[in-house]
Amino acid sequence: MSGTTVPRRRGRPRREETADTRDHILTAAREEFSERGYDRASVRGIAKAAGVDPALVHHYFGTKEQVFAAAIEVAFAPALDAPEALADAPLDAVGERLARFIFGVWENPATRTPLLAIVRSALNNDTAAAVFRRLVASQLLRRIAGRFDRPDAELRAELAAAQLVGCAILRYVIKVEPLASADVEQIIARVAPVVQGHLTGP
């Protein structure tokens, strides 16, 4: 009959719906974690924002911790390209290259906003911090350390990351002046030699 609405079947979504539905949930999750933080965000709230049943969120991702892990991996993806940015850099230029890449990610509003949500959640919640730590350790720091043939390469990579992350938190999250409004090129010029020292110095 014309004009009759065919009810949608319950249960798992059709295959062609899967990718779009999953991405829609992840987008809603990033927004919820950004606005509410890890503690106040909930699977029910994420589902409501995505316009789906909470059971569907659990179906795709599992627990809230797993939703957060999936959401931040997507949001953190631009920063995870840092090892590739170092791939063709001379050893005496890796500090400048890494600093320029990381600050470039933070300076871009499109990539800065989800990063802010990640960092704020990680600073305020132990579970979120553990998820963030696993992601950074396994997909960023170890890959950067693999660029250097040194017995303490992982420690060096962590120290370099601490320098960059600390500056980023002060500049973009806490917004300490004059760092928050300083020209990014000036910051890179001062931070890069320190990062270089961590990675390749004695």
Image: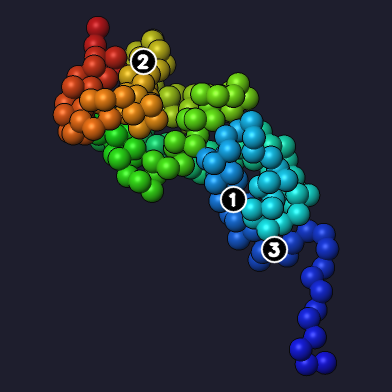
Task: List the residue tagged with mark 3.
Answer: 15
| Viewer-side label of 1, 3 | 1
| Local secondary structure at mark 2 | helix
Residue 167 is situated, as x and y percent measured from the top left of the image, at 32, 23
Disc 2 versus disc 3: nearer the observer: 2
Residue 82 lies left or right of residue 195; in this view the side is right
- The numbered mark at residue 159 is 2
Q: Is residue 201 above or below residue 63?
A: above
Quarter of the figure with the N terminus: bottom right
Circle 1 is placed at which residue position? 28
Q: Secondary structure at mark 3?
A: helix
Residue 88 point in image, percent of width and height:
25, 35
Sequence-first tag of 1 and 2: 1
Q: Residue at x 78, y 81 (%)?
A: 5
Assign the C terminus to one quadrant of the image: top left
Image location of residue 75, percent across then percent down: 48, 42
The residue most toward the bottom is 2
The amino acid type, in three-letter code, at marker 2 is Leu
Q: Quadrant of residue 84?
A: top left
In the rendered structure, which amino acid carries the disc numbered 3? Arg
